[in-house]
Amino acid sequence: MNGPPAAGRLGFEAFGTAAGLALVTGALSVVAPFFTVLTGTLAALGVAGWTAVRRREGGVVRSLRAPGRAVGVLALGVGGGLYLDTPTPLVPFRALLLGIGLAALWYGERGLRMRGVAREETM
């Protein structure tokens, strides 16, 4: 069977689930503000899962050499910064911005994995 080991697969599954749910709860927080805290919690879970897998596979800083991953981390950093210190007009959208940042990191990771799988199959 080709693919990453089970621990890596589980780590990214938790990361993908947290990213997807953070995006959904971030969108819901625009109309129901109590979802804001849940979005922050899901983002923390997603970042912890992503970091654990990156550490296992060679380090977080070294992994930022991939452009998709670096852009995702930058988007998550901007979303996290806006979540923690929100300008007044953006307060209703702060959890949504955090969810979008986490989804951007997930999308960057997914693109890298898909390209890596395609390269392995052609060899």
Image (cartoon, rainbow, N blue to C red):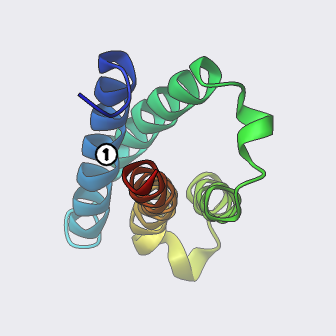
Tally of numbered discs: 1
The quarter holding residue 3 reads: top left
Q: Position of residue 36 (x, y in %)?
A: 35, 52
> Which residue sits at x=29%, y=19%?
6
Q: Secondary structure at mark 1?
A: helix
> Which residue sits at x=78%, y=52%?
65
Question: Nearest the camera: 109 or 20?
Answer: 109
Residue 97: tell me if it is visible. yes
> As drawn, which residue projects farthest toward the front?
123
Q: Position of residue 109 (x, y in %)?
A: 49, 53
Q: Is residue 9 above or below residue 73?
A: above
The quarter holding residue 16 reads: top left
Q: Position of residue 69 (x, y in %)?
A: 62, 56
User: Counting other residues with Cα less than 10 Å from the Cα at mark 1, is it few (<14), some (14-19), or many (20 or more)?
Assistant: many
Q: Position of residue 77 (x, y in %)?
A: 67, 55
In the rendered structure, which amino acid carries the disc numbered 1? Gly
> Which residue is tagged 1?
16
21 sits left or right of 56 in the view: left
Q: Is residue 51 above or below residue 15?
A: above
16 sits left or right of 109 in the view: left
Question: Nearest the camera: 123 or 20?
Answer: 123
